[in-house]
Image (cartoon, rainbow, N blue to C red):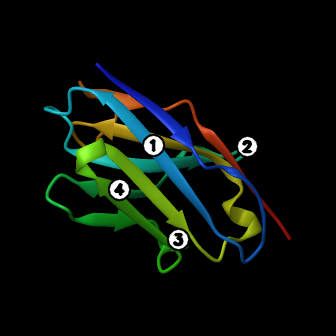
Amino acid sequence: QVQLVESGGGLVQAGGSLRLSCAASGSMLSINVRGWYRQAPGKQRELVADILRGGSTYYADSVKGRFTISIDNGENAVYLQMNNLKPEDTAVYYCRYSSTRAMNVPYDYWGQGTQVTVSS
């Protein structure tokens, strides 16, 4: 089992920055992907960014050049640095640790979510 706890959300003006953190406890043996998803009101949950065990990263087009995902292997943590935030970035952000990028797989863990609100 893996337990995830997010922090770092909040209210920020457009153009501002936030850094989300996801602290993990438990065994990382089966974890190959660490990612950040978000869900805005009335919309489906979407992948924002993820990072594979080997270090390769993925970013949604909407956040490329503004967001950066990073990990701290010593702390089993994943971070999301969000710069130049826009009102459309407003959502609940979730971290996910999983064995693969696919959904509904064994070893698939989610945090409780942290609210990010960007005012115009």
For discs 2 and 4, the disc positioned in front in the rendered view: 4
For the residues labelled 3 and 4, say whether their Cβ atoms are less than 8 Å apart.
Answer: no
- Residue reaching furthest to the right: 120
Q: Is residue 101 visible?
A: no
Which residue, given by chain and number where applicable, does mark 4 sit on? 50
Which residue, given by chain and number where applicable, does mark 3 sit on? 63
- Element under disc 3: helix
Q: Which mark is drawn over residue 42?
A: 2
Q: Amino acid at mark 4?
A: Asp
Above or below for 35 versus 66: above
In the figure, residue 12 lies in which quadrant?
bottom right
Mark 2 or mark 4: which comes first in sequence?
2
Residue located at (30% from left, 43% from top)? 75
In the figure, residue 117 lies in which quadrant?
bottom right
Q: Quadrant of the N terminus?
A: top left
Mark 2 or mark 1: which comes first in sequence?
1
Mark 3 or mark 1: which comes first in sequence?
1
- Per the model, the C-alpha gap separating discs 2 and 1 is 25 Å
Above or below for 44 versus 63: above
- Element under disc 1: strand
- Element under disc 2: loop
Q: Amino acid at mark 1?
A: Cys
- Per the model, the C-alpha gap separating discs 3 and 1 is 19 Å
Residue 3 horizontal/vertical position (percent) = 39, 25
Which residue, given by chain and number where applicable, does mark 1 sit on? 22
Mark 3 or mark 4: which comes first in sequence?
4
